[in-house]
């Protein structure tokens, strides 16, 4: 017989916590429960659905955003923990009609098909260039391995990243 | 995920006070705890967010290094002093997880990450680690990833960390604080074997918090390696991993330390095995003898029987890499 | 140098950048769970723990009492749903009785949805779901298909091809100089598109619902919801403008759309349901397969006999089957061939089509067995395939509309350097690594399905082409744009393609690699009709400068009709429409297989076979001692008729090849038969290839003109890339190591002694 879960002992009273985030350059204030992830906050409360939920467990990278400049899985990040942080999402990369060089490179190299992993791939690639540790094709592959792509666009993604790697404005 | 209370202390003493109650979990990077909360495996009553505690620094200490419990995996792996003096630690960290996870996962959290046993994660199944007394489904089940060493009839889970395998060969010590004060735990004593109480992964006492990890003043940068074997070439947990450091003097091994990952409830070392290498000229036969000694008592569970042979070969190869000064790259996937 | 978006010349054959690219790289493309709807409720599914039995008690009190929980929907309180199976049978349902969630207390597979907790926020629902407790009565189950008896159902799927046997296989095999008699195994695989299955149902309150669903067929889902819930068709609109991958998981309506609609109907509210990645392992999957292959050949490698039998599991409630055993018998010349198949029934959900169903399994495993024959006879693997080459579909004994496989073999071999191969296993090395070169053949159907497109040209020169079909990452938007732009001589940014809306003209589900050929043809025909109307309108222009020329006398370029005989005479589209007093010109046209062909196919009498082919060459490097495999190089040469867009076409093949790498080395859903449950139900333990696993892939399209296969000569590319790829890799691993692994995936443990 399958086991039953232990009776939940959690307190159920909701204590909302006030946090401030800067999302794509805009100051935002939230009163939220501590169990809201940054990913769900972006998608469900700010309608920034460019950040994707591909597994919700840090196993695919589709939810990758830049927090204080660093790439992280927003699905495993409780929003309250990031109080005071600066969040950059795919929506914050382009300015008006001008795409970020990484975005343009992805189009030019056909570095996606269904597009669902794409925002995470792009944010991750930018985060990787900022880290400055991805020298050469092998290193790009290894350092992008936290972003799965079921359509199998990997070689095109690596081409896209390589094509802008040297550019200051690609970081 | 259940509902929980949330505290965000700003100093260690406050955190220890907040943490001193049943059902409280300290939250650092969250890469494992939040994952398990979403699976309803961890159901904390309160979460104490320790990210604002001053435990982020990596500092010189007694000729060695003191790594703050909240230093991220990326910060540790890319710290110039770690790269220069403790490259086996950097390499083991970079073999694990993904860059995004390493950007949030912390040193302390890495020590406390929980097993990837498929049954531990699936709360419709029996699991003594998750729910003591319900039984171990992994025995006789899908146990490709499970332990070959140090297991018990109650639990055949493995510790999934790569970083800890690197720390194990560095003879690190773990500094903790808690309701009963501060203490220091030798790394080898930090994790425990499952025995009859697999619900406990380590020897932390209730309410205790890791503050830092000390690396002694030793330099193994010349002869080391971290070799990880897994089901794809990146972003997968180890089937078997091996960390090796050596001191070679006048062509003979003066000291060798070998730790295995992915095979037991803790990083696996053997004084006997390491002792066999001392005084030896590095050779295939010496490495093989050490491998046999390190795997003494290894037992498969069916689907993971292969790990014994794989571990033996991996130990030999890793010793060779360390002795030759040709450590495994975590970027070039060709095994050196 | 970065090119500007879509400034390439358009039309069939141009490498236009994906027209939905900008939306996808900016986060602007919205998928099923991302459409904003006011006053939305969130549903989280509670999944069952046992494989067979029934729910005896469902404890929902704690969940109902939890903050923000609105309802716990289950078999205990669900609203009325249809009784008869027919209502649940979607366009591609296999014979049987489709799964109905919450119909009653019965449990028929592990992971089955038991309840849906609906909350005001996602977090409320998720919390509520964690509080639901279920008590079961457990019945004995069986999930190990090799322990269940084989059977052959009388009724097969419409698309199933019964084997047609020839000659005397047993006699020829007995006499053959060389024999291979082997048993191969492919494990269960799960589709795992990156977007988890999700549905947003918008409840309008006036009887209408708008359903944003992750599906490969908006109209298939629409018809299903009408049948199951009794909505009037006009009141159900299903939208799927962007689909985060499918690979077959979205061919049939899956339970998330059923549950979201059920809850919306019950609560009269808008509801969103998103499955978890764990729940992505709780419905359809590629069936595991036991493939028995027996080959006889003479000394020069000429096949004397082929025996191929595939056994696969199906569920207890539907009989799902794929044509797995036939491919080798179709592809190669051999006078004696027997193909056979059987099912066994197990307590799982029904398997379903996954990228190249049948061929990805059957051709892959057959091509590995054939490689064994190459070593058995000492004939080079490529030479062996050329020796047995056939220009006919050997099973049906009919010619192909085209088959440039010989060219694919040759161009692929040249690009790969196959002639440099040392024949003996373990004969090639690179330092500590053994090097292996292997190859295989791929084959897939080139299908064509009736598709209707509406083309609408506005006076400002903007052209819209629309159909209900889907672009699941396959590039359909781009293909439609190219064909339309080419037909009317417009730049790409003057054309918009509209998809993913059940209100649009009918399209089949997006699958089978038929979309480019079928939708492309329909766009062409609809645009041709617009051209005719435009030409007529041009006659109304003052002075009739084109002299009433018919469409054939005109060139349609740069938004103008130009008299071919005298290019100085031209009329702009806008000018013509103004003269005719119309603000737009619209035409809705269907492209369909010809009536004779349809009847023929219905009767099982095909005059010609329509197939794509490929030749795959793989290089692996294997650490001799540790069994670590790296796929360092793949060349995939494809013969697939006319290539609409070399850039997106190449991506399709790359994707198939990468999934083939996964099939060869990584993918395997592991079942615990004691509890009848898939256990590695996540992305950490169900491995698909990561960046580090994918090195160089070279894609070649060989020239293959074909005026018969479809109106535009297009064959389709969505599936051919995976077929045979795993075999080429497996064969390369044998060449490298001398170890023949007959059970995929070839994980590290299988390469140790």
Image: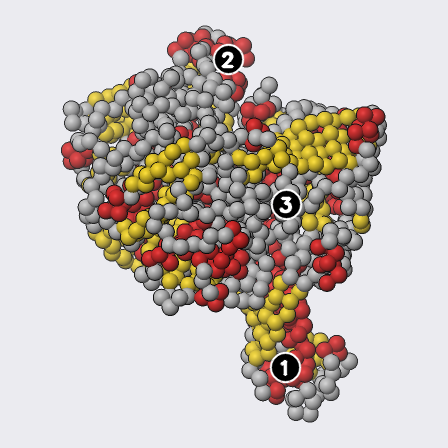
First-in-chain label (3 vs 1) = 3
Which is closer to the viewer, label 3 or label 1? Answer: 3
Q: Secondary structure at mark 2?
A: helix
Q: Secondary structure at mark 3?
A: loop
Which label belongs to residue C68? none
Q: CA distance from mark 3 to mark 1?
A: 57 Å
Query: Dot 2, crowdedness within 10 Å: few (<14), some or many (≥20)?
Result: many
The verdict on a common chain for dots 2 and 3 is no
Percent coordinates x, y for residue B269 in the rendering: 40, 16
Whether C451 is drawn above or below C71: the answer is below
Number of residue marks: 3
Give the residue at mark 2.
B287
Q: Residues within 10 Å of mark 3 (few under 14, many from 20)?
A: few
Give the residue displayed 56% in from the left and 39% down from the top.
C314
Task: State the quadrant of the N terminus of chain C.
Answer: bottom right
In percent of width and height, residue A120 lies at 44, 49
Q: From the viewer's side, name the closer residue of C334 and B102.
A: C334
Q: Nearer the viewer, mark 2 or mark 1?
A: 1
Pick the front one: C422 or A75: A75
Percent across and percent down for residue B112 are 31, 29
Question: Picture coordinates of residue C113 (x, y %)?
Answer: 41, 44
**Which residue, given by chain and number where applicable, does mark 3 sit on?**
C155
Instruction: Choose top left, top right, bottom left or bottom right for residue C217.
Output: bottom right
Label 1 sits on a secondary structure element that is: strand
Residue at horizontal 31 percent and vertical 23 percent from the top: B133
Residue at image mark 1:
C572
């Amino acid at each position: 017989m399958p086991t039953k879960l232990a009776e939940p002992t959690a307190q159920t009273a909701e204590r909302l916590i006030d946090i401030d985030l800067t999302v794509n350059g805009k100051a935002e204030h939230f009163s939220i429960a501590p169990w809201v992830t940054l990913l769900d906050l972006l998608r469900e409360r700010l309608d920034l659905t460019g950040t994707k939920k591909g597994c919700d467990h840090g196993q695919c990278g589709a939810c990758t955003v830049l927090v204080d400049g660093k790439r992280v899985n927003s699905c495993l990040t409780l929003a309250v923990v990031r109080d005071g942080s600066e969040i950059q999402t795919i929506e914050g990369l382009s300015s008006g009609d001008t795409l970020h060089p990484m975005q343009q490179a992805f189009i030019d190299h056909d570095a996606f098909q269904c597009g669902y992993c794409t925002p995470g791939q792009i944010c991750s690639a930018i985060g990787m260039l900022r880290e400055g540790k991805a020298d050469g094709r092998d290193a790009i592959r290894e350092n992008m391995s936290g972003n799965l792509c079921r359509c199998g666009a990997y070689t095109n993604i690596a081409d896209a990243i390589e094509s802008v790697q040297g550019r200051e404005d690609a970081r | 995920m259940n509902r929980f209370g949330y505290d965000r202390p700003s100093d260690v003493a406050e955190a220890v006070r907040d943490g001193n109650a049943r059902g409280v979990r300290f939250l650092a990077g969250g890469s494992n705890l939040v994952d398990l909360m979403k699976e309803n495996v961890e159901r904390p009553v309160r979460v104490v967010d320790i990210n604002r505690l001053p435990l982020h620094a990596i500092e010189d200490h007694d000729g060695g290094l003191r790594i703050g419990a909240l230093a991220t995996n990326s910060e540790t792996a890319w710290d110039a002093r770690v790269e220069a003096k403790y490259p086996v630690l950097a390499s083991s960290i970079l073999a694990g997880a993904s860059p995004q996870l390493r950007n949030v996962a912390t040193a302390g959290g890495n020590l406390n990450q929980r097993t990837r046993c498929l049954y531990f994660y699936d709360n419709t199944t029996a699991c003594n680690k998750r729910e003591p007394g319900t039984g171990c489904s992994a025995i006789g089940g899908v146990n490709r990833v499970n332990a070959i060493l140090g297991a018990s009839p109650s639990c055949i889970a493995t510790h999934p960390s790569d970083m800890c395998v690197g720390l194990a060969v560095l003879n690190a010590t773990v500094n903790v604080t808690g309701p009963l004060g501060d203490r220091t735990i030798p790394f080898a004593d930090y994790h425990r074997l499952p025995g009859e109480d697999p619900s406990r992964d380590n020897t932390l006492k209730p309410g205790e918090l890791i503050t830092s990890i000390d690396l002694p003043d030793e330099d193994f940068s010349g002869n080391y390696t971290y070799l990880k074997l897994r089901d794809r070439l990146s972003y997968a947990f180890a089937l078997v991993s091996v960390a090796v450091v050596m001191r070679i003097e006048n062509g003979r091994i003066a000291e060798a330390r070998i730790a295995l990952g992915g095979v037991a409830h803790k990083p696996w070392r053997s004084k006997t095995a390491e002792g066999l290498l001392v005084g030896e000229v590095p050779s295939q036969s010496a490495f093989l003898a050490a491998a046999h000694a390190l795997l003494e008592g290894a037992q498969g569970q069916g689907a993971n029987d292969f790990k014994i042979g794989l571990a033996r070969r991996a130990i030999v190869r890793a010793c060779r890499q360390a002795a030759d000064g040709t450590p495994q790259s975590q970027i070039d996937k060709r095994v050196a | 140098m970065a090119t500007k978006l879509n400034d390439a010349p358009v039309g069939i054959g141009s490498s236009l950048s994906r027209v939905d690219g900008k939306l996808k790289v900016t986060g602007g493309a919205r998928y099923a769970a991302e459409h904003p709807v006011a006053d939305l409720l969130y549903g989280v599914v509670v999944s069952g723990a046992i494989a067979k039995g029934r729910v005896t008690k469902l404890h929902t009190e704690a969940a109902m009492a939890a903050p923000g929980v609105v309802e716990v929907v289950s078999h205990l309180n669900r609203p009325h749903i249809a009784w008869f199976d027919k209502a649940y049978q979607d366009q591609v349902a296999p014979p049987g009785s489709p799964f109905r969630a919450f119909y009653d207390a019965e449990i028929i597979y592990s992971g089955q949805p038991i309840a849906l907790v609906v909350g005001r926020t996602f977090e409320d629902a998720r919390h509520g779901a964690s509080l639901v407790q279920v008590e079961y009565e457990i019945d004995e189950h069986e999930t190990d298909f090799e322990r269940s008896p084989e059977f052959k159902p009388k009724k097969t799927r419409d698309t199933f091809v019964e084997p047609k046997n020839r000659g005397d296989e047993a006699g020829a095999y007995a006499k053959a100089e060389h024999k291979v008699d082997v048993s191969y195994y492919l494990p269960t695989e799960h589709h795992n598109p990156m977007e988890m299955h999700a549905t947003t149902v918008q409840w309008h309150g006036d009887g209408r619902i708008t359903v944003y669903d992750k599906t490969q067929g908006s109209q298939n889902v629409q018809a299903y919801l009408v049948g199951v819930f009794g909505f009037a068709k006009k009141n159900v609109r299903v939208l799927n403008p962007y689909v985060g991958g499918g690979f077959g998981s979205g061919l049939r309506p899956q339970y998330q759309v059923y549950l979201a609609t059920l809850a919306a109907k019950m609560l009269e509210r808008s509801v969103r349901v998103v499955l978890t990645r764990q729940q992505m392992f709780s419905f359809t999957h590629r069936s595991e397969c036991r493939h028995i292959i027996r080959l006889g050949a003479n000394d020069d490698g000429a096949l004397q006999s082929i025996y191929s039998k595939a056994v696969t599991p199906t569920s207890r409630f539907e009989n799902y089957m794929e044509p797995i055993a036939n491919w080798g018998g179709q592809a190669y010349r051999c006078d004696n061939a027997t193909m056979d198949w059987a099912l066994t029934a197990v307590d799982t959900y029904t398997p379903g089509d996954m990228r190249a169903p049948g061929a990805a399994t059957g051709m892959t495993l057959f091509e590995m067995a054939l490689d064994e024959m190459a070593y058995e006879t000492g004939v080079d693997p490529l030479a062996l395939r050329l020796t047995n080459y056939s220009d006919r579909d050997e099973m049906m004994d009919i010619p192909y509309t085209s088959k440039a496989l010989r060219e694919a073999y040759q161009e692929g071999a040249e690009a790969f350097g196959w002639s440099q191969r040392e024949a003996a296993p373990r004969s090639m090395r690179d330092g500590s690594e053994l090097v292996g070169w292997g190859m295989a053949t791929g084959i897939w159907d080139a299908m064509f399905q009736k598709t209707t497109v509406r083309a609408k040209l506005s006076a400002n020169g903007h052209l819209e082409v629309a159909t209900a079909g889907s672009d699941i990452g396959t590039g359909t938007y781009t293909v439609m744009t190219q064909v339309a732009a080419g037909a009317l001589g417009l730049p790409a940014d003057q054309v918009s393609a509209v998809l993913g809306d059940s209100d649009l003209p009918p399209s089949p589900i997006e699958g089978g690699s038929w979309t480019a050929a079928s939708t492309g043809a329909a766009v062409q025909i609809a645009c041709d009709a617009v051209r005719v109307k435009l030409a007529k309108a041009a006659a109304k222009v003052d002075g009739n400068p084109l002299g009433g020329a018919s469409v054939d006398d005109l060139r349609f370029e740069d938004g103008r009709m130009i008299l071919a005989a005298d290019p100085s005479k031209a009329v702009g589209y806008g000018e013509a429409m103004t003269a005719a007093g119309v603000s737009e010109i619209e035409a809705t046209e269907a492209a369909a297989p010809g009536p004779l062909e349809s009847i023929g196919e219905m009767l099982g009498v095909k005059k010609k076979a329509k197939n794509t082919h490929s030749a795959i060459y793989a290089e692996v490097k294997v650490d001799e001692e540790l069994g670590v495999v790296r796929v360092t190089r793949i060349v995939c040469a494809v013969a697939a008729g006319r290539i609409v867009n070399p850039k997106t076409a190449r991506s399709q093949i790359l994707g198939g090849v990468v999934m083939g790498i996964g099939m060869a080395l990584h993918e395997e859903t592991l079942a615990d038969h004691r509890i009848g449950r898939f256990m590695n139900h996540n992305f950490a333990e169900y491995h698909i290839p990561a960046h580090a696993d994918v090195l160089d892939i070279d894609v070649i399209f060989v020239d293959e003109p074909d005026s018969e296969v479809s109106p535009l000569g297009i064959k389709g590319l969505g599936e051919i890339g995976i077929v045979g790829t795993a075999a080429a890799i497996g064969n390369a691993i044998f060449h490298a190591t001398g170890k023949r692994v007959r059970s995929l995936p070839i994980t590290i443990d299988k390469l140790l002694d």
